[in-house]
Image (cartoon, helix red, strand yellow):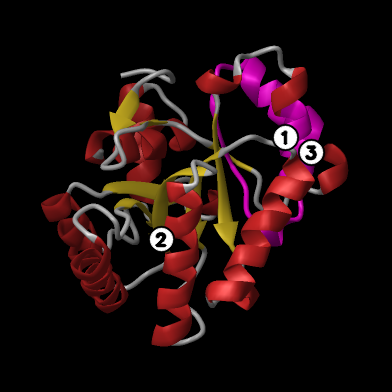
Amino acid sequence: MNINTKYKLLSSHSIPTLGYGVYQTPASTTESVVLHAFKQGYRHIDSARVYRNEQPCADAIRKSGIPRSEIFFTSKVPPRSMGYEATKAAIESSFTQTGLEYIDLYLIHAPYGGKVAREGTWRALVEAQKAGRVRSLGASNYGVHHLEELEAYIKELEARDGKGKGGEISVGQWELHPWLTRPDIVAWCRERGVVVEAYCPLVRGERFGEESLQRLAKVYGKTPAQVLLRWSLQKG
């Protein structure tokens, strides 16, 4: 496994194992740090509408000289844009700001707004996928009950529109690390072939001083950050 390793998604597309997230990265510096990430070998950039830095991410993609087909770009529906019409507008804003022809992965950022709004958001995402503007879909910060609600809605759409017409949950994204393992969510995803994506795998550096982590780092001659990344990678 290396920085170029990929996982196959239910959508039939592939996602790089390692991604570079730009949460809390100021728009003024995003382009330069993303270009630096590309130079280090990253090919997956994780942004979101609420990060307010989609445009400089796209600018970096264009300026990198790397073929667009080799870069995986993620964005997310903001919590305040839940619901069919609001999500359609959010998706359109992503394309207006980035100028990209397609977005590789569009996630629902969080399960806000209630059942009707969540379902409307998913329907808007499925339409964007059908139109070829978004390649893969998923959800972030969903609980198992939210995932089951979405799974039921996908079956409802398929019953109405035909098999494969309800979209698929290709990726689920959560904060995951040794101190927050979420076994119920991980098991749910594994049973269905949903790729589990971890954010904050380094725990924001807050656990680097933990005795157990320090001990492992010393045994293997690695930094605490390297040990934590290894944990995530071995968990798949």
Which residue is painted at 24% across and 70% down in the image? 160
Q: Is 47 part of what is drawn in magenta?
A: yes
Which image quadrant is residue 148 in?
A: bottom left
Residue designated by label 2: 139
- Identity, as a three-letter code, of the amino acid under mark 1: Ala
Specify whether 36 is left or right of 199.
Answer: right
Residue designated by label 3: 56
**Magenta region's main secondary structure?**
helix
Residue designated by label 1: 58
Specify whether 133 is left or right of 197.
Answer: right
- Does residue 216 sit above or below 3 in this rendering? below
Please rate how many residues cluster around mark 2, counting C-alpha atoms within 10 Å: few if below 14, some from 14 to 19, many from 20: many
Magenta-highlighted residues: 31-60
Position of the N terminus by quadrant: top left
Specify whether 161 is left or right of 2.
Answer: left
Dot 3 and dot 1 residues touching (CB under 8 Å): yes
Cα–Cα gap, marks 1 and 2: 22 Å
